[in-house]
Image: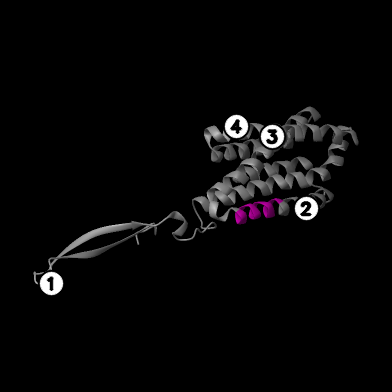
């Protein structure tokens, strides 16, 4: 087999002449291609290359789920900060999920033209910047803009990450998609408890958004 296991090569001989004739042996080089489905099995979690990109997809969904899981904990704090009370909930969610819908629609168009990897990395960058904007916000209008951008970039990450990870390992599509959903569920499940404890300990909500922005930039 060659280095990637995709073809088999060897030698065979052809004997010339009849029983009474002197035999001549002629070496012939040949190769046999092996279909991709019969080559060596893929290793989706191998470090580097596609494995690293698949891990990035999982991390992106994890971070977006952390935000979605914690936002309900932040609502009373945001309402108190800007003097809006429960009405803040009715203003934040339309901005957030309106941006989410826009991000889903636009990212599909862009991923077909410039590639899913570029769209995903761009969405992660916008997500980090939007979290940072929320962390530095001092007016409720800026918060609404930040949440709309968070929703748009989060919608793009969720859509493109799933499609990209499935394309990376078509033979392991089910396993990859399951890993993505596990990452999303872990983020959504852990973040409410963590956010509640940090806020109860006296940490300012601005710092929590800035910390999430820093984690996204590192990603």
Q: Which mark is residue 19?
A: 1
**Residue 153, position in %: x, y?**
67, 36
Looking at the image, tell me whether mark 3 or mark 1 is earlier in sequence order.
Answer: 1
Left or right for 165, reference 64 = left
> What is the C-alpha distance between the residues marked 1 and 2?
87 Å
The disc placed on residue 194 is 2
**Residue drawn 53% across and 49% down?**
168
- Is label 4 in a helix, a strand or a loop? helix
Q: Earlier in the sequence, mark 1 or mark 4?
A: 1
- Of 101 and 79, nearer the camera is 101
Residue 30: image quadrant is bottom left
**Against 42, is 125 above or below?**
above
Prevailing secondary structure of the magenta residues: helix
Which of marks 2 and 1 precedes in the sequence?
1
Q: Is residue 182 magenta?
A: yes
Q: In the image, which residues are magenta?
A: 174-184
Determine crowd level at label 4: few under 14, some 14-19, many 20+ residues with C-alpha closer than 10 A. few
**Mark 3 = which residue?**
152
Residue at the image position 70 percent from the left and 50 percent from the top: 184
Mark 2 to mark 4 CA distance (whole Å): 36 Å
């Amino acid at each position: 087999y060659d280095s990637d296991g995709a073809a088999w090569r060897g030698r065979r001989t052809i004997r010339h002449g009849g029983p009474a004739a002197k035999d001549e042996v002629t070496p012939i080089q040949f190769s046999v291609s092996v279909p991709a489905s019969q080559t060596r099995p893929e290793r989706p979690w191998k470090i580097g290359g596609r494995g690293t990109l698949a891990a990035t997809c999982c991390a992106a969904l994890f971070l977006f789920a952390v935000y979605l899981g914690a936002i309900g904990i932040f609502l009373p704090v945001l309402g108190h900060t800007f003097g809006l009370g429960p009405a803040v909930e009715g203003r934040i969610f339309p901005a957030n999920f309106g941006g989410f819908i826009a991000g889903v629609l636009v990212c599909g168009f862009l991923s077909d033209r410039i590639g899913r990897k570029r769209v995903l990395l761009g969405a992660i960058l916008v997500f980090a910047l939007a979290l940072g904007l929320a962390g530095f916000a001092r007016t409720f209008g800026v918060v609404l803009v930040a949440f709309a951008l968070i929703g748009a970039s989060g919608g793009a990450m969720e859509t493109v990450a799933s499609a990209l990870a499935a394309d990376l390992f078509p033979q392991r599509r089910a396993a990859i998609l399951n890993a993505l959903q596990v990452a999303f569920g872990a983020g959504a499940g852990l973040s409410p408890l963590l956010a509640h404890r940090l806020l109860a300990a006296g940490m300012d909500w601005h710092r929590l958004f800035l910390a999430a922005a820093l984690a996204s930039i590192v990603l």
